[in-house]
Image (cartoon, rainbow, N blue to C red):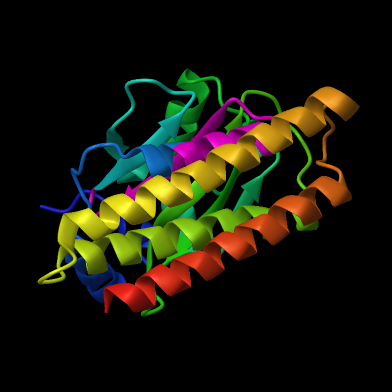
């Protein structure tokens, strides 16, 4: 029997869940490439926590986790990520302690973990359905600029593309796992290089909140380049 309240469900919930199911990624093991992307976001935005959340019917499963070791899933009603799926757009809470949009269960869960700031962008599949969120979380309230939100959405778009090509590779009659291994290995190296660059910039000029515009522009450009490579890989896997 479903436990998620109707108020958390988007209008397209049935078809959205079918899209998520088609990707066959629920309950899958952690993969280094997805872990590298959440590490990149945590490093760039100078937050302790970043997650890739897949929002199923009554449960949120975490494909990649930075900063909350051991977290694999939680009830959907307790997850702030459920709101981005319901709204089908990015959601930002600069201070969760003063938000009135959360369910009581989500308020309790956030308080128990000491979470104060949340920003999440939807993982939008090629068919338009939102299958989850890419989010960053802090234990302190903080501002979040429109430019930062755009770069967070770029992270989400990259992850959504990775999920799509993962499914395309793994179901291809000839490419299969070998092609996905090539894709994730090469892109992981690219993301690792970008993490190293962001760390260097932070060491050289210090960390700032919000993230400086020039750093955001650099990362935005690199993420767009990665999405371009991803599109090339996707066409090769067809």
Q: Is residue 166 left or right of residue 172?
A: right
Residue 138 in the image: above or below residue 191: above
Residue 56 in the image: above or below residue 64: below
* Image x and y of residue 158, in percent: 50, 59
Q: Confirm whether the magenta stretch covers residue 9.
A: no
Residue 86 or residue 157, whichever sits in front: 157
Q: Is residue 121 left or right of residue 53?
A: right
* Number of dots carrying numbers: 0
Which residues fall within the magenta stretch? 36-58
* Image x and y of residue 56, in percent: 25, 54
Which image quarter is the C terminus in? bottom left
- Is residue 78 visible to us here? no
Residue 176 or residue 88, whichever sits in front: 176
Residue at screen point 31% across, 40% down: 31
Residue at screen point 76% across, 29% down: 200
Q: Is residue 12 left or right of residue 228?
A: left
Residue 215 in the image: above or below residue 30: below
* Image x and y of residue 64, in percent: 38, 38
Residue at screen point 45% across, 56% down: 159
Residue at screen point 28% across, 35% down: 73
Quadrant of the rendered structure where residue 14 is? Answer: bottom left
* Image x and y of residue 97, in percent: 63, 31
- Is residue 237 visible to us here? yes
Quadrant of the rendered structure where residue 178 is? Answer: bottom left
Residue 27 or residue 236, whichever sits in front: 236
Q: Confirm whether the magenta stretch covers residue 50.
A: yes
């Amino acid at each position: 029997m479903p436990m998620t309240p109707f108020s958390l469900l988007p209008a397209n919930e049935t078809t959205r869940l079918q899209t998520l199911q088609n990707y066959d990624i629920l309950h899958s093991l952690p993969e280094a490439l997805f872990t590298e992307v959440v590490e990149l976001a945590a490093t760039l935005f100078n937050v302790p926590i970043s997650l890739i959340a897949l929002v199923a019917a009554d449960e949120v499963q975490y494909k990649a986790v930075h900063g909350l070791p051991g977290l694999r899933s939680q009830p959907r009603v307790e997850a702030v990520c459920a709101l981005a799926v319901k709204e089908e757009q990015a959601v930002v809470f600069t201070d969760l302690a003063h938000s009135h949009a959360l369910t009581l269960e989500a308020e309790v869960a956030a308080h128990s973990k000491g979470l104060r700031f949340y920003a999440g962008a939807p993982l939008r599949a090629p068919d338009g359905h939102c299958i989850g969120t890419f989010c960053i979380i802090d234990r302190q309230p903080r501002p979040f600029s429109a430019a930062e939100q755009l770069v967070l959405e770029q992270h989400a778009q990259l992850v959504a593309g990775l999920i799509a090509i993962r499914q395309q590779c793994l179901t291809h009659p000839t490419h299969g796992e070998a092609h996905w291994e090539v894709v994730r290995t090469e892109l992981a190296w690219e993301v690792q290089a970008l993490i190293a660059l962001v760390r260097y910039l932070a060491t050289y000029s210090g960390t700032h909140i919000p993230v400086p515009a020039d750093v955001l522009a650099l990362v935005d450009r690199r993420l767009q380049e990665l999405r371009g490579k991803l599109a090339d890989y996707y066409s090769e896997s067809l």
